[in-house]
Image (cartoon, rainbow, N blue to C red):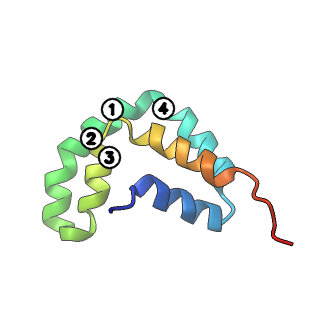
């Protein structure tokens, strides 16, 4: 089962303590989601030709119009307070 890039990104942002600023920026850029998807479609083939398999998942994720919505949901899941064992 492949892990959604939004969850990977959210986990990395949580590790670095950047969930709140990332959530704010993702919300601010939601109206640009369709434009970012169009940009991903336009530059995807060129980026894959130059970067090979390293950029393939990123460009496919950018091509998805719901990518920002999934990122916001993943950030919300990562940012929830967790009960500490003990």
Residue that badge 2 annotates? 39
Residue that badge 3 annotates? 62
User: Residue 17: percent from the left, percent from the top?
Assistant: 69, 62
Sequence-first disc among 2 and 4: 4
User: Residue at image x 81%, y 70%?
Assistant: 85
Marks 2 & 1, CB-CB < 8 Å contact: yes
User: Residue 79: percent from the left, percent from the top?
Assistant: 68, 52
Marks 4 & 3, CB-CB < 8 Å contact: no
Q: Nearer the viewer, residue 82 or 73?
A: 82
Q: Secondary structure at mark 1?
A: helix
The crowding category of the residue bearing disc 1, from other C-alpha atoms within 10 Å (few below 14, some 14 to 19, many at least 20), is: some
Sequence-first disc among 4 and 3: 4
Q: Is residue 17 left or right of residue 44?
A: right
- Residue 26 has which mark? none
Cα separation, mark 2 vs mark 1, equals: 6 Å
User: Residue 26: percent from the left, percent from the top?
Assistant: 54, 41
* Disc 2 versus disc 4: nearer the observer: 4
* Disc 3 versus disc 2: nearer the observer: 3
Marks 1 & 3, CB-CB < 8 Å contact: no
Residue that badge 4 annotates? 30
Marks 2 & 4, CB-CB < 8 Å contact: no
User: Residue at image x 54%, y 42%?
Assistant: 73
Looking at the image, residue 12 lies above or below residue 80: below
Image quadrant of residue 65? top left
């Amino acid at each position: 089962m492949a892990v959604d890039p939004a969850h990977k990104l959210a986990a990395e942002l949580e590790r670095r303590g950047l969930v709140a600023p990332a959530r704010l920026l993702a919300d601010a850029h939601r109206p640009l989601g369709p434009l970012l998807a169009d940009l991903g479609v336009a530059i995807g083939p060129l980026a894959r030709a130059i970067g090979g398999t390293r950029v393939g998942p990123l460009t496919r994720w950018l091509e998805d119009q719901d990518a920002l919505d999934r990122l916001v949901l993943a950030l919300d899941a990562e940012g929830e307070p967790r009960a500490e064992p003990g």
